[in-house]
Structure formats: structure tokens, C-alpha cells
Amino acid sequence: MIAARLLQRIEANWEAIAQAVISSRNQDPSLPHYRTLSDQEIRDRVRDLTTNLGRWLYTKDDTSIAHHYEQLGRTRYAQAVPLHEVILKLISIKRAIRTYASEQNYNLSPVDIYDELELLRAMAGYFDFVIYRVTKGYESAMRVTDDPAKSRFSGLQAVKAKSA
């Protein structure tokens, strides 16, 4: 098992991780749209990501988790949160989890340290998967926009049309 005790501590202490994410959001000027989301929405997202981390690591259930995060991407598009902020927030949550995990490594044996490194490596793969799926959902919602003139991305579409 990949650092099962550490993963259990991460899942059990998601609230402390969420508070760190909320604090960083409030101090980060590059996340203006995320400031409009409630603290509860951020807590829910951190709880969701930490819970699904364990599920993904142990079951490799890509299908339901992929669908879940693609829906999140569509939701963030509907909320008019820019994609770069969505990705930055996911990276921020990943950093908060990694920081929490690193702070839990008191008096570890070499085997425990190896397990922690394996968990951090696997967690990086999980967040790569989540970011990809959120982006895919976001872009699918963007393509559904029928009227390019109303799209927030009409400038990008115009650039693509000129280059074609």
C-alpha cells in the first residue's frame, strides 16, 4: 500500500488542508474569480479531491473520476471562472496536500520516507489526471457555446479562423 497511514491522515485532516487553501486563495491576487466562491465550496472541493485521491490510488477507477472532474470543468466554465484560475487552484490544492504530507514526516524510518515519496509521486499523477479531465470538461462546455459572438473566447476563435 502506498503510504496508507499518511493517506489516511490526509483524508482525515482535509479540513486543515482546506483552511490552508482558503488562506492562500485570499492572499493570491491571481485568483480573483475564486474569491467569489464561498469558503464552503473550497472546503467541498478539497474534501472531494482528498477522498478521490485515495479512491483513484486504490481502485484506478478512471471512468467515474474522469466524468466527475469533467463535470467540474463544465461547472467552472458556466461560472465564468477562467481556465487558468481553475488550473492554478488545483495546483494550489495539490501543494497544500503535499505540504501537509511533508509536515507529517516526524521520525520516519527509511521505509516510511520511501512510502511518502511514492505517495507524492502517485499524487502528482492523480493531479495530472484531474487537471486534464477538468480542462477537457471546460473545453467541451466552451465548444457547446452556440453563438461565437457571445462566447468569452470569441477572440481566440477569430485568431483560429484567420490562421486556418
Image (cartoon, helix red, strand yellow):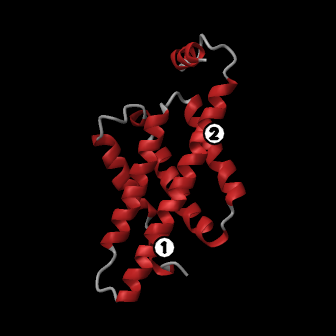
User: Can you tell which of label 1 and label 2 is closer to the viewer?
Assistant: 2
Q: Amino acid at mark 2?
A: Gly
From the top left corner, tell me how far across and down residue 83 is, in percent: 49, 34
Is label 1 in contact with label 2 (beta carbons under 8 Å)? no
Residue reaching furthest to the top: 149
Q: Are there few (<14), some (14-19), or many (20+) residues within 10 Å of tag 1?
A: many
Task: Count the labels in the image.
Answer: 2
Task: Identify the residue shown where x is 62% and y is 40%.
Answer: 136
From the top left corner, tell me how far across and down residue 21 is, in percent: 37, 51
Viewer-closest of 135 and 81: 135
Circle 1 residue: 7
Q: Amino acid at mark 1?
A: Leu
Task: From the viewer's perspective, tell me whether residue 125 is left or right of residue 95.
Answer: right
Viewer-closest of 45 and 64: 64
Task: Identify the residue shown where x is 63% and y is 39%.
Answer: 137
Look at the numbered disc 1 and give the secondary structure of its residue. helix
Q: Is residue 104 above or below residue 145?
A: below
| Residue 32 location, quadrant | top left
| Residue 27 location, quadrant | top left
Look at the numbered disc 2 and give the secondary structure of its residue. helix
Circle 2 residue: 137
**First in residue order: circle 1 vs circle 2:** 1
Task: Identify the residue shown where x is 47% and y is 31%.
Answer: 82
Q: Is residue 92 above or below residue 6?
A: above
From the top left corner, tell me how far across and down residue 127 is, in percent: 51, 56
From the top left corner, tell me how far across and down residue 120 is, in percent: 43, 68
Task: Identify the residue shown where x is 46% and y is 48%.
Answer: 90
| Residue 52 location, quadrant | bottom right
